[in-house]
Image: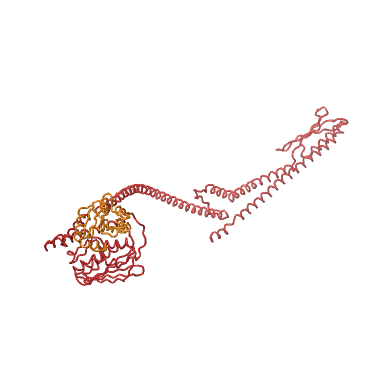
Chain colours: A red, B orange
Amino acid sequence: MTTELLSASRRQRLGNRTLLVLLATLVFSLLAATGITTLLVSREMLNHFASEDDIALNLLSKALSPALAAGKQAEIDALLAAALQRETIVELAIYDQNGELLRTVSRQPPPGSDPLRSRRPIAGLQAAAGHLEAVTVDGPRQALVRRLAAALFVCLLPVLASITACSYFFLKRLFIAPLSELNRALAVMGPNDFSPRLDAGRKDEWGLVAHSFNAMAQRLEQTARAGDRLRRDMARQVDERTRELAAKTEKLARSQTALTYLLEDVNDAKQQLEEANHKLQELDRLKSMFIASMSHELRTPLNSIIGFTGIILQGLAGSISDEQRDQLQRVYNASKHLLALITDVIDISKIEAGRIDSYAEEFDFNELVREALANLQTQLRDKGLALRVEVPAALPLFTDRRRLLQCLLNYLGNAIRYTEKGSITLAAELQGENLVLRVRDTGIGIAPEDLERLFQSFVRLDSPLKLKTPGTGLGLYLTKKIATEILSGTVTATSEPGVGSTFGLRVPARLPARKEKEQP
Amino acid sequence: MKRALVIEDNDDNMKLITFLLEHHGFQTIRAWTGEEGLRAAASEQPDFVILDIQLPGMDGYEVLARLRSQADQTGRLPVIAMTSFAMAGDREKLLAAGCDGYIEKPIDPMLVMAQIEAIIGEQP
């Protein structure tokens, strides 16, 4: 910037040159004016000289008129001779009224002169008496004037010409040439070509213009190049994006196709699943029907087996030997076990099929305890176990009596089965809205890791008692099912191996009403 | 001697229950169908009835309803239902239909007489 300013101040020479050209023009104008003035003055002078000749010849003509009329030859000759004294007059001739030459005088004209012939009338009395014809040439003054004028022009013309040429040259150099150059550069300069540069070497304003122009061109070129780069980058990016998009579109199309296949597969699978589900439901229905049917069919023969075995065992059908009694007792136990197994399996299958609803009724828990004891009395007596009952004198309930009894029998049955000595305690009380009952034994107990599996189906824990104690492996599973799904309660179990176990049941004392289902 | 009318279509069950009843000192009248049972109830004047529910043709509920519809002594006979449809609701349904008691099949010969005597409320 600084250099540009410096160079700018140094380069402002165009003004000086313009002044020079103006001066030259002034000089040219002065010279031209001088020339023209000279021309006009010389012409005026020449005319003036010519009119002197006219006056002289007119005077001669006047003077000849009376001499001609009088026919005085001498006077005419004298007049003619006097007139011929004038250095500009070289020949005189007088003609009469008929055009006849009367007299003529002449002398040798100076060399190189340009003779001019003129004719004028000589006045007579009435009409013209004749004519005077004169031949005049330039005198020395005219010649001098002409030579001077010619010399002046000869000197002036080349000066004028050279001044004109110089002016033209300078003007051209100063304005036209740089303008043309600028014009050419501007004409070439376009959106695709920023190459034109001006010669910035000139030390005048054109140099500055050229410098500015070049700077501008360079900036434009840089801008254009940057624009080009940007455009190319953008084009490349657009290309890339287009390619990526195309790839993604293709991928998407493939995914869509895959998805379509997948959907078809899923639909097929869904249909298959629905069919399978339908079949399963049908199977389930058939299973339930089968179980309901089996329930009756299996129980009927068991009725006979248990019944008659029991009669014989009781000695009602006659006396039997001890061995027969022992064997029959085994048959009786096995058939009771089978009956329990069948009953449990049927109950579980019905609960799992959601085909058992609760039937709540009003009763006292003590009734239930009495019924349970009647059922278990033999077993308790056989094992020599004491049963302690810790139940309030009145414990009214409204729930499914039969199912609650089932749970109670299960807990008590297990306690008796797995306790060799000591006692079993049945405790029950109302806690808020719930009946909480506990069956505590002093049996073998259960290892902590086994407690979790306890309420699963067909789990019978390994124990020294397993082989000689009957059990379906379904009792606790069924108890849990009944407690949770029919009685809306929970079961618990805590134990200490070798000390005893406690099984708990917590169910609503008043069972919420449920929608009744049709029984099959 | 108390007379028990047993209405039961299954021969084993019939023998079992009549054997037990007779062994405990009851007289038994046997009927194999509902119709036969109703006739016997009218003609034989039993003291109580042991009624199987799953009977061919006229079932136990129908027999019970007809017995209860009688205006005379027959309509007030104690009836003990006996069924292997030991399901929740059966007990309520039977008691609502007019049964005096309810025994589940398979019957346990060790317990059944105690149950029966508890229901009819007296010794034979």
Residue A62 appears anywhere in the view: yes
Q: Find residue A114 and report its horizontal and vertical position in percent.
A: 72, 37
Quadrant of image for the N terminus of chain B: bottom left
- Position of residue A330 relative to residue A138, above or below, is below
Nearer-the-camera pick, A132 or A225? A225
Question: How many marks overall?
Answer: 0
Nearer-the-camera pick, A331 or A233? A331
Q: Find residue A55 and report its horizontal and vertical position in percent.
A: 81, 39
Q: Find residue A486 and report its horizontal and vertical position in percent.
A: 32, 61
Nearer-the-camera pick, A45 or B118? B118
Residue B15 in the figure: left or right of residue A197? left
Residue A306 appears anywhere in the view: no
Examine the image and state in which quarter residue A403 appears. bottom left
Q: What residue lies at 53% left-to-right and 49% top-to-bottom?
A: A185
Residue B4 in the figure: left or right of residue A363? left
Quadrant of image for the C terminus of chain B: bottom left
Nearer-the-camera pick, B4 or A28? B4
Q: Find residue B5 and report its horizontal and vertical position in percent.
A: 24, 56
